[in-house]
Amino acid sequence: MGSKRLNNPVVGVDMGGTKILAGVVTEEGNIIGMAKRATKPADGADKVIERIVRTVQDAVANAKLKLDDIAGIASGTPGPLDPDSGIVISAPNLGWDNVPLAKLLSRALDMPVFIENDVNIGTLGEAALGAGKGVKDLIGIFVGTGIGGGIILDGMLWQGWRKTAGEVGHMILLPEGPLCGCGRRGCAESLASRTAIERDILAGIALGRESLVPEILKREDKTRLTSGILAEALKKGDPLVGEVIGRTQYYLGLLVASIVNFIDPEMVILGGGVVVALGDDFLVPIRRVAYQYFINQRNAKDVKIVPAKLGDNAGVLGAAVYARQRLA
Amino acid sequence: MGSKRLNNPVVGVDMGGTKILAGVVTEEGNIIGMAKRATKPADGADKVIERIVRTVQDAVANAKLKLDDIAGIASGTPGPLDPDSGIVISAPNLGWDNVPLAKLLSRALDMPVFIENDVNIGTLGEAALGAGKGVKDLIGIFVGTGIGGGIILDGMLWQGWRKTAGEVGHMILLPEGPLCGCGRRGCAESLASRTAIERDILAGIALGRESLVPEILKREDKTRLTSGILAEALKKGDPLVGEVIGRTQYYLGLLVASIVNFIDPEMVILGGGVVVALGDDFLVPIRRVAYQYFINQRNAKDVKIVPAKLGDNAGVLGAAVYARQRLA
């Protein structure tokens, strides 16, 4: 091929604290080559960036292409970061401060490289190629260790004036509520993340409530209450887990309603580890609470509240979509 | 002049439950003729619409122009309404249901007429010609009997998918909190509107708390706690009023922070009867709480939290700006 044209494939990178995923994605949104590597952030930024470069090269080779066939690259990266300068300002779980990631990757791979917040990228992927296909205005809410979000308006990622929009996990839902990871109290994340669920279940057990959780933890030889363990306990009818998950759904319903009353989107997509592990039924009570709290009850049910559907590929696909939008 | 060109003056109408205000506004945003009439909604929609028509005609005459010199008209109107079809779906304080206001005005005045929610229009006015001049992304929060809001993104009003965006008064701030006018509990409006302030002050008085309010109400021969009475009691150091206003500022600060953490605007404008009556100092504690709750602390203070500055003209000017945007 030779020349890099805008309709050539792009590479989407999903870079987390544990693993680096790269995928070659066609203009139609198909993944035609993938590669994966451990991140090993303890080795330092230089080594991690080397590993990203090699993962991109592997993905391109797996697609039976050459780097020269790729129009550009984007990476979903833990933030905060500056998508304009391509600098990762601070990524605590990587141990990074002010790393000019886009420039370093661009130099090593000799093509345009863009970076964006990983949750924004996941939302963009779901919007363009997943649960939100065909929808122009939507919000993504991802419930895992924390709660993150992304905003798509008119089909484009809404980045915000300081490029930090979408922090739905730090909308305040219960003033003077539980301590949040951010040091404040009562943020949505302090009430409805996996971390909050774990805290409340362990507190219940400590207070002598009956639960299957200690038994499962012992059997699995684990100390952390993963989403998978939550799902098992819930399925087996654990009353404590059921109560805590119910409270989580209530708060997520209020969060969805607050967001809808504010920005009035067509769709809210719920994803992340907790949602994936607990399945689509997890959304039923969230919907019930949310619809009840919509101030505008006309056409309320037309606002869709749906699970994410790209799973592990959301990051790679979203990064590919973002690369195309930035290259255009 | 004869032909209606886009750079001709437009008429902005501010239509409330009490009064109708119309202003002829030049392309530069100057008001060159005004008129005012009582709304008298009890007379029925037909009579009210007749009065709007006459108020527009008076404003044009006061500007020493003819209707034919006017490029178009827009009206800020209590909603919910549909800005596309120009129908007021329901306006409880007017007693209106499904009134095709834009079409009726357009027929009577023989020119394009647009309508939009009054709070959106006020926000647009502040954005284009008031506190937000030169700012592209901002949120307006108006604290009066209720709490309303408007969203400006990229310099344009964000109307939302169902055209009902900006309902900041019904973002949930305290689950299971006080009963709201909307029938739910814990909305921002149930915690920080003039209605909420009045409820809490009257409850305090009923419980035997000392306050200057009963004395002022008696002197003024009033039964409602207006914003003006609040301002007087606060100025005189009324401890009960001070406490309730302090709580209001705390909740408004949390509301501002939740909104900023979500949409990341450059500016938040606070207006409405309570803010006007209590003056710019009312914003000091709101800012303190809000900045403290910003999840992104980088450049936090660059996000401006400011009082509205167009006062009674916000509606007329905003409607004029909206008319131009729709005509363009």
Image (tube, coloured by chain):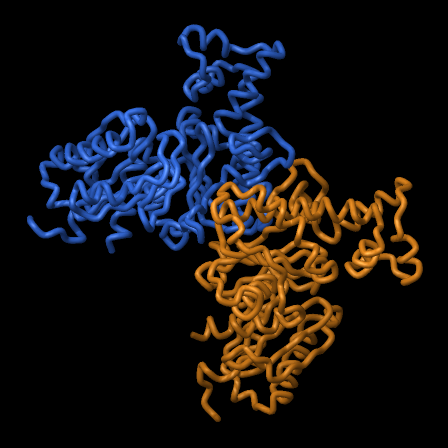
Chain colours: A orange, B blue
Q: In this view, does A242 lie above or below B62?
A: below
Q: Is residue B131 visible?
A: no
Report the side of A4 relative to B239 (left or right): left
Report the side of B269 relative to A66 (left or right): left
Residue A256: percent from the left, percent from the top?
59, 49
What residue is drawn where x is 51% and y is 48%? A300
B19 vs A327, nearest the viewer:
B19
Residue B303: percent from the left, percent from the top?
48, 46
For residue B154, what is the image quadrant? Answer: bottom left
Q: What quarter of the picture does the C terminus of chain A occupy?
A: bottom left
Q: Can residue B270 be seen in this view?
A: yes
Residue B254: percent from the left, percent from the top?
57, 38
What residue is drawn where x is 40% and y is 8%? B221
What residue is drawn where x is 60% and y is 84%? A32
Instruction: Tally the marks.
Output: 0
Residue B84: percent from the left, percent from the top?
33, 51
Q: Is residue B139 above or below residue B240?
A: below
A281 vs B210, nearest the viewer:
A281
A22 vs A79, nearest the viewer:
A22
